[in-house]
Image (cartoon, coloured by chain):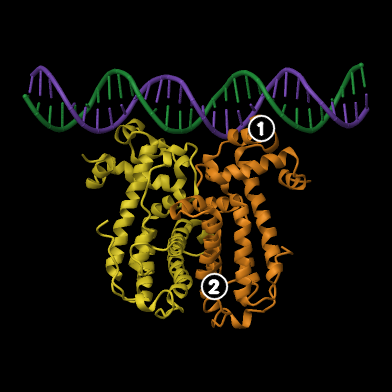
Chain colours: A orange, B yellow, C green, D purple
Amino acid sequence: MATPLQKARKDPDSMKARILKKARRIFGEYGFHGATTRMIAEDVGIDISTLYYHWGEKGDLYEAVVLDINEDLKEKLVAVERAIRGLPLATRMDIAIDRMTDYLFDNREISNLVLFRYFGKTRDASLLDFQVPEFVSEIARSMGLCRDKVNVPKIVRMHVLAMMNAIHNFVSGEDFFRSMLSVERDEYVSMVKDTLKYILLPAFTGSAGENGNNEEYGTNLKDAKTPSLENG
Amino acid sequence: MATPLQKARKDPDSMKARILKKARRIFGEYGFHGATTRMIAEDVGIDISTLYYHWGEKGDLYEAVVLDINEDLKEKLVAVERAIRGLPLATRMDIAIDRMTDYLFDNREISNLVLFRYFGKTRDASLLDFQVPEFVSEIARSMGLCRDKVNVPKIVRMHVLAMMNAIHNFVSGEDFFRSMLSVERDEYVSMVKDTLKYILLPAFTGSAGENGNNEEYGTNLKDAKTPSLENG
DNA sequence: TAATCTCTCCAACAATCGCTGGAAACATTA
DNA sequence: TAATGTTTCCAGCGATTGTTGGAGAGATTA
């Protein structure tokens, strides 16, 4: 018994998938209340009732969008984890920042929607009460930021949140920040990466550009075996 | 010739000011489209047409709200700058983080509205085309993060953006992150401060908890005379 | 062919949106 | 007191919102 979301992800050419794709973009740009079902339907090129035929209420479509990007995000995190496994901590972070930044710049709706979920509220609270796993602990483990692989300390989860938020902010606020700094797209992207590394690497690896020797993070962990996201 | 906003800020007991205060909170919680003029009027306890009598269109009220929090933010930055002037860089950052975090936790709508402005769009773009000064260069100067006091380099402005965004995120996302971590309010606030310092201090001052000896920032700047925000 | 199922659109619904005209209530001035 | 100006509310406007019923078009099955 496949859910509508599973069907859509299985067949990307189906009408369900086409609607979902546009819905991601529009919900991401305007938020839940800023987006209208008519905007989405018009973007797909279909009548509005066709949209309702496939996805039901606006809230259901929004939930599908959130779960959809969550699935994409998880797949990407697994791929990044595989790429950095076994490398020293500083290298792991360097690569992870590069890859996640590139990926999110190519899929801006993801950052937009994550931030909307963090910071925005809905008039009808019951529309947003569905649960979405947040991966912070998994990221902490795959980065090797804590020794205890079962129970990730709260403060470490805060550190991961700070990292992820920093990336999402620069991706999602691109238009605003770029016009503020008067830079082109390419220059902005590389400035984002530089800034993220400038700020994050020293904190987690000891000093900028070098491998970790911080007493809490670093040395003993930089090539520690880390558990996998893939069986979650 | 005083603008409505100036009148409201001058007399905090006036109806204009009472409406503005509630509007800050509701626009901050729900965003421009999520908030309705009826919600605001109901919150003040007045009829909706009274709101329109004082503030005109919804977009005008929203603009007044944004300019209002901007003025508050500027005043706070001036106060913080005065408190940290002349101190070593690490101390400056430590105090600035503490004060700004406390202030924004006490005035969450500010962080909410700043983030909405960065990441959200409006259906009618012309509603948001008013300009708001962004203070990034002033913050960079008052923190002593650059030598050239006239022209703050773009990469330094990016660093300031990263700092400010990190604070706004934790303030604005309090509900979400707290339920994610299962912590009480007080514990969350102190975890936020710890995390901000853990991440930001090493990058800007060389190593955690110590004064700066970074070759770009730090040494020569930690007690440099910095220009003031007050005459802006 | 007839019947059934899947899909798409047209038209319209009630509710809510931003917004306004005009009448009261109140305060100020003459 | 009378006249004028300011503030507030009631009632309602047109437009847009989310949402639905029902009629077709097309493919599949009987």
Pick whichever, B58 or A199, lies toward us.
Answer: A199
Residue A133 visible? The answer is no
Measured as percent of width and height from the top left, residue B166 is found at 47, 62
Q: Position of residue A45 (x, y in %)?
A: 66, 32
User: Is residue A23 left or right of A175 when viewed as pictured?
Assistant: right
Kind of residue indicated by mark 1: Gly
Q: Respond whether the residues carrying marks 2 and 1 are from the same subunit.
A: yes
Residue occupying image coordinates x 39% and y 76%: B218
Q: Is residue A201 left or right of residue C23?
A: right
Q: Position of residue C10 (x, y in %)?
A: 65, 20
As drawn, the label of residue A45 is 1
Q: Tags 2 and 1 in contact by the CB under 8 Å rule? A: no
Q: Chain of mark 1?
A: A
Check disc 2 and report the residue beneath it. A201
Tell me the crowding category of disc 2: few under 14, some 14 to 19, or many 20 or more residues within 10 angstroms, Cα based.
many
Compared to B149, does A132 lie above or below?
Answer: above
